[in-house]
């Protein structure tokens, strides 16, 4: 009996886990499947039923301050991202044709926005300009500066850029210190 119980408990535990993990048989798929949006922007989401549903899906967000929906019922909705970047959770609820409730959670990533000023300056050979950057959606607007091209001039940590002594199109990159995926690129025409 004890040996039988040892086998039963892990199987029961795995069965319970199967109810809470994404098994692929979710009843409703999301389009896009892995939503990504920038802070403050809107995104259209579509529910694609994989079976007959007894009612239209209802949309919700799991976290306080994690955005909102312009339409909370139906197969299509517009998600309005919050003003803070991060990872949030969308919830879709419905009822299967047999009356079984469906509750599916989807992660959504809200990205910060980096803005560089000036965005497209024209400079004389060897001249200097100061760039500034602002990061929307993160508590700090600090960035690191770099130049994409090895021979494209130099930039200091305060955003002071010195153009090279040869003409061309060069790219100054501002990268958020809090999120390395959040970047902005200024195109510098050196003449």
Image (cartoon, helix red, strand yellow):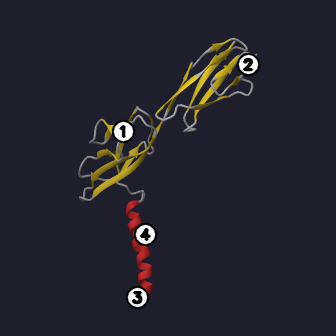
Q: Is residue 27 above or below residue 44?
A: below
Report helix, strand or loop for mark 2. Answer: loop
Mark 2 neighbour density, 10 Å: few (under 14) some (14–19) many (20 or more): many
Q: CA distance from mark 1 to mark 3?
A: 53 Å
- Camera-near label (2 vs 4) is 2
Disc 3 versus disc 2: distance between alpha carbons? 81 Å
Which comes before the other along the chain, label 4 or label 3? 3
Q: CA distance from mark 4 to mark 3?
A: 20 Å
Query: What residue would you read off at disc 3?
Result: 1
What residue would you read off at disc 1? 67
Q: x, y percentage for residue 31?
A: 40, 43
Residue matched to label 4 = 14
Find the distance from the CA under tag 2 to the CA under tag 4: 63 Å
* Residue occupying image coordinates x 41% and y 34%: 83
Query: In terms of sequence position, does the residue under pointer 2 or pointer 4 come before the other?
Result: 4
The CA span between labels 1 and 4 is 34 Å
Drawn side of residue 131 relative to residue 64, left or right: right
Q: How many marks?
A: 4
Residue 81 appears at what percent x and percent y? 39, 36
Q: Nearer the viewer, residue 6 or 138?
A: 138
Looking at the rendered image, the quarter that the C terminus falls into is: top right
Q: Earlier in the sequence, mark 1 or mark 3?
A: 3
Q: Choose mark 3 or mark 2, whichever is in front.
A: 2
Res. 164 mark: 2
- Element at badge 3? loop
Residue 178 figure quarter: top right
């Amino acid at each position: 009996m004890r040996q039988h119980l040892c086998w039963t408990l892990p199987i029961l535990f795995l069965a319970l886990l199967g109810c809470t993990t994404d098994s692929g048989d979710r009843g409703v798929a999301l389009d896009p499947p892995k939503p990504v949006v920038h802070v403050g922007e809107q995104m259209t989401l579509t529910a694609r039923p994989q079976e007959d549903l007894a009612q239209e899906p209802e949309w919700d967000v799991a976290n306080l301050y994690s955005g909102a929906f312009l339409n909370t019922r139906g197969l299509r909705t517009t998600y309005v991202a919050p003003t803070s970047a991060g990872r949030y959770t969308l919830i879709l609820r419905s009822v299967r044709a047999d009356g079984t409730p469906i509750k599916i959670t989807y992660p959504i990533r809200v990205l910060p926005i980096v803005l560089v000023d000036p965005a497209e300056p024209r400079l004389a050979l060897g001249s200097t300009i100061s760039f500034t950057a602002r990061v929307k959606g993160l508590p700090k607007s600090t960035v690191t500066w770099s130049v994409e091209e090895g021979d494209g001039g130099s930039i200091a940590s305060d955003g002071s850029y010195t153009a090279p002594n040869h003409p061309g199109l060069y790219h100054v990159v501002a990268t958020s210190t809090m999120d390395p995926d959040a970047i902005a690129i200024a195109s510098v025409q050196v003449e």
